[in-house]
Amino acid sequence: MQRVAPSVRVVIVSYECAAHLDRCLRALDAARHLVPMEVHVVDNASTDGGDAVAAARPWVHLERMPRNAGFAVAANRGLAGAETGAVLVLNPDAHMSPRDLLACLDRLAADPSAGVLTPRVVDQTGRFDGRCRRGFPTVPAALGVLTGLDRRFPRLLGGYTMAWRDPGEPVDVVAVSGAVMFIRTEALRAAGGFDERYFMYAEDMDLCIRIARLGWRIRYWPGATAVHAGGASGRPVAAREAFWRSMAVFTRRHRPGPRGLPARVAVTATTEVAVAAARLRRWRPAAPPTSR
């Protein structure tokens, strides 16, 4: 009897990353013979022709947003009405081999307790990206990531990326990265999708925490690998501002009450300083050209 592969809807939110999107879709095209798959690309009003990259493939469902509505809004548009057993939220600058994609779906289907699963994620040089498996972003953990000291003092400052754990060890985590995020559709429906108060960043952590509160496990599983280039969409200064704004929203939501007050104050203050600094860099006049 021939085995039937689990079905999946792949949702890709694209913005100004046509070349990466083309690479991502070529990888998915190679997987379509193994996996019953729907591919939805939601383009956030790109101007670099990314929508045309998707439109050129008849098997891709393309939705063009009239403006850049942010990741959460666009992702929810692509996820709406999914009837597949699982969904895969995939960054346009990420890709997987067909067999790795199928292995993740098989693993998710085989573990009814798992609501979210991510594989081992590496960058383009093959270096492990610790952000694919996350602990709760406490103030010391955030400090460790921002300063790079999480690698030197993993037990003390490595809580966010679980830096003390072996990347080859499967483990339950607080959250996974939205770059490569396999979600059981039943769990997604129960949680209500991404919180659209987040423009970009932290919405993946927020969704994982809400799914876990409903009784599902959030799993890091290194039995498969995905490649994530990182930083393909958005301008660095605007991205930093969006990150800090999202972290402020996240902290207010998930660190309520008196015990969370120090964290809320610290993150709010850091956010305002970081946003002000980002805006100063954006408005700084360009340096005059130099002669050779």
Image (cartoon, rainbow, N blue to C red):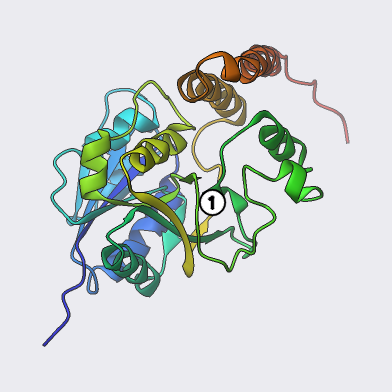
Report the amino acid beneath label 1.
Arg
**Circle 1 residue:** 133
Question: Along the line of sight, which residue is nearer the eye, 95 or 264?
Answer: 264
Question: Along the line of sight, which residue is nearer the eye, 115 or 5?
Answer: 115
Q: Quadrant of the N terminus?
A: bottom left
Q: Position of residue 22 (x, y in %)?
A: 38, 54
Q: Quadrant of the C terminus?
A: top right
Left of 248 or right of it: where is 10? left
Which quadrant of the structure image shows residue 284? top right
Against 184, residue 244 (above or below) is above
Q: Is residue 150 visible?
A: no
Q: Residue at x 14, y 84 (%)?
A: 2
Q: Residue at x 37, y 64 (%)?
A: 27
Left of 130 or right of it: where is 37? left
Q: Residue at x 51, y 64 (%)?
A: 170
Mark 1 nearby-residue class (10 Å; few <14, some 14–19, many ≥20): many
Q: Residue at x 20, y 47 (%)?
A: 186
Of all residues, the one furthest to the right in this rendering is: 292
Q: Position of residue 44 (x, y in %)?
A: 34, 31
Number of marks in picture? 1
Q: Secondary structure at mark 1?
A: strand
Question: Along the line of sight, which residue is nearer the eye, 236 or 99?
Answer: 99
Q: Position of residue 147 (x, y in %)?
A: 77, 37
Of all residues, the one furthest to the front in this rendering is: 258
Left of 232 or right of it: where is 13? left
Left of 112 or right of it: where is 3? left
Q: Position of residue 243 (x, y in %)?
A: 55, 27
